[in-house]
Amino acid sequence: MPELKGFDVWVEVNGVRLEEYKVEASGDKVACWIPSEAGKDFKIGFAIPLGRQVATNHALALTLDGKPIYLAEGIVRQSIATLAYSPRYLSGELVNNGRAIQSFQFGTLELTDDDSLLHLATGQFGELQVTVSSVETFLKVPILGSTNLSGYQRNDQFVAHERSKKGSAHCVKFGEQKPIARPTHTVKSVGVAKLCTFVFNYRPMDILMANDIAPPRTTKAGSASNSGSGSSNSAAGGRGQASGSKRKSDEFKVEECSESGAVDGQIDRLEAQLRDLRQSKDARGAGPPLKRVKKEHKSTLVSGEVIDLTIVKEEPTRNFVPGEVIDLTI
């Protein structure tokens, strides 16, 4: 956010830009919601487009909870030498007759049921507003010793009727004062033209979430409980999966072992048969050759059939080819 006409304005706490929610632009005005935390100092950052810095001067005006703030840092002079993006900051109000800057700070708004405050004008608690204007020229005005640089008499009353400020819990207070050298001159803006306005509505994060402005956050406890229940379920499921996987693994191992045992047994039997054959061969080589008795097949002769005894049928020779395997299981 909020970026409008090339201008960028934001709010920082501890050097971190606050998240902006529900950004809405209408004409020359843009508004959003930001989370606030009581006791935290903040500053407002802004950046002027490079083209506009080269073309003209600019001035920023700030109101906090409807109160105008006397700034010492809201002037950006025209510069043709500007070549890079350069963020600037509004970090506090000029106080103590120009001898100190007091930081901006989120604080707790005191709510009361005193009806006497109901008809009194109360500040616009919960709102920061930054207005950016172009300026034709700045006139230097010397500061005399008697010049009052406090701007106005600030009324630090942070009390509102509970009905007039329902939903508000914070306001802008002021933090530590940092001494500075008293300025020697001030400036008067001539030829002011309003360009755009940025409005930051601030509330505690719990209120933003309760009003569906900010998304709900995942708390550690919620995450732990969810993860706990999830982990218990997943643990149960995990145990089931683990046990199932273990059973499958065990069954696979049993099948693997049984198949492996069968193969090993078959190999042992084949090797035993091979040893027996080798022993038989060695035994035949040591003694006289055994006579082979050929078993004659019985044939039933038909009357008138002639047996030809002149033809001798020779057995074909079979040589083993290297690499062949003798299958002893048949």
Image: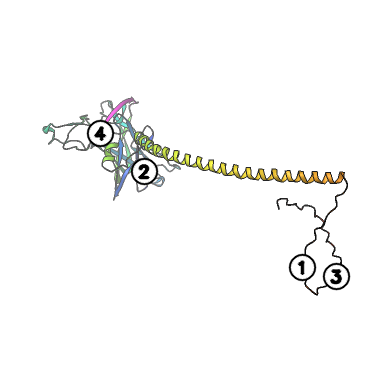
Q: Position of residue 101 (x, y in %)?
A: 32, 28
The residue shown at (85%, 63%) is 314
Q: Residue lying farthest left?
A: 116
Label 2 Cα crowd, 10 Å radius (few <14 / some 14-19 / many 20+): some
Hey, what amino acid is under mark 4?
His
Counting other residues with Cα less than 10 Å from the Cα at mark 1, is it few (<14), some (14-19), or many (20 or more)?
Answer: few
- Quadrant containing the N terminus is top left
Question: Rounded to the nearest whole Å, what is the CA distance between mark 3 and mark 1?
Answer: 15 Å
Q: Which residue is mark 2?
A: 8
Give the residue number, with chain letter if any, for mark 1: 300
Badge 1 or badge 2: first in the primary sequence: 2
Q: Element at badge 4?
A: strand
Disc 3 versus disc 1: nearer the observer: 1
Q: Residue 170, which numbered label?
A: 4
Query: Splitting the image into 4 quarters, where does residue 124 fall?
Result: top left
Q: What's the amino acid at mark 3?
A: Asp
Residue extending farthest bottom:
304
**Number of the front mark, 1 or 4:** 1
- Does dot 3 land on a helix, a strand or a loop? loop
Q: Which residue is mark 3?
A: 308
Query: Dot 4: few (<14), some (14–19), or many (≥20) neighbours within 10 Å?
Result: many
For this rendering, which residue is in front, 36 or 94?
36
Question: Residue 188 at what x, y percent from top left?
Answer: 29, 38
Q: Is residue 201 visible?
A: no
From mark 2 to mark 4, how far is it between C-alphas?
25 Å
Is residue 38 at all visible to an observer of this figure?
yes
User: Observer-nearest residue: 298 or 257?
Assistant: 298
**Region rendered in magenta:** 168-182
